[in-house]
Image: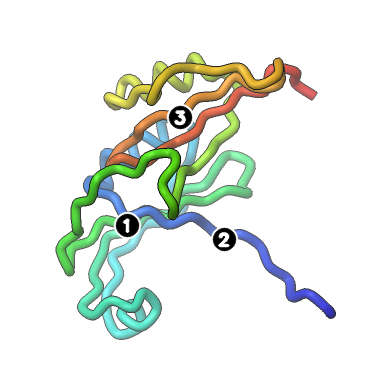
Amino acid sequence: MQRMAIKLENVGIAVRDLEATIAFFTDLGLTVVGRDTVSGEWTDTAVGLDGNHANIAMLQTPDGHGRLELFEYIHPEAIESTPTRPNEIGMHRVAFSVDDIDKALEIAARHGCRPLRGVATYEDIYKLTYVRGPSGIIVMLAEELKKS
């Protein structure tokens, strides 16, 4: 059986405050590569939500391989939910490799974001932590200890 070509395009995240979320991720090193306001029949159909109207921003990692699409709903009104926990079924987290986890945590702290528990070391390979980011997003930060 021949497989079709597939690649990950982006991870989409609905946020409470688009500007605050952009500030958090750009301070960590991502770049805004596009912004728009979307609405109309095409977006209603694609998303499956009548009256869909949102401000969006596409952010990209410095290597150009990872992208986040952030959207802040104008209509219908966004639905607040309890932030997910690491063991809940569904969208779990977004993860980033960083050169310096301590510096990344300083940046996160400036945005009021702290680790869920602390920084762990995995088999002398990675230092890593989960941070509760803007809009309750769980963000994993990992620093490779043995740089190749």
Task: Give the quadrant of the C terminus.
Answer: top right
Judge from the rendering whether residue 104 lies leftward or rightward of residue 124; answer left or right.
left
Amino acid type of the residue that numbered disc 3 sits on in the rendered structure? Tyr
| 2 and 1 marks in contact (CB < 8 Å) | no
How crowded pointer 2 is (Cα within 10 Å; few <14, some 14-19, many 20+) is rated as few
Q: How are the residues colored?
A: rainbow
Q: Which residue is mark 3?
A: 130
| 2 and 3 marks in contact (CB < 8 Å) | no
Q: Nearer the viewer, residue 113 or 69?
A: 113
Judge from the rendering whether residue 36 lies leftward or rightward of residue 140; answer left or right.
left
Which residue lies most toward the right here? 1
Amino acid type of the residue that numbered disc 1 sits on in the rendered structure? Phe
Distance, label 3 to label 1, CA atoms, is: 22 Å
Q: Position of residue 32 (x, y in %)?
A: 43, 47
Image disc number at residue 9 = 2
Residue 128 appears in which quarter of the rendering?
top right
Distance, label 2 to label 3, CA atoms, is: 23 Å
Q: Position of residue 141 (x, y in %)?
A: 52, 29
How crowded pointer 1 is (Cα within 10 Å; few <14, some 14-19, many 20+) is rated as many
Q: Element type at marker 1? A: strand
Q: Which residue is mark 1?
A: 71
**Given this view, does label 3 or label 1 mark the residue nearer the observer?**
3
Q: Nearer the viewer, residue 32 or 43?
A: 43
Residue 105 appears in which quarter of the rendering?
top left
Q: Position of residue 90 (x, y in %)?
A: 44, 54
Q: Element type at marker 3? A: strand
Q: Residue visible at 28% across and 50% down? A: 15
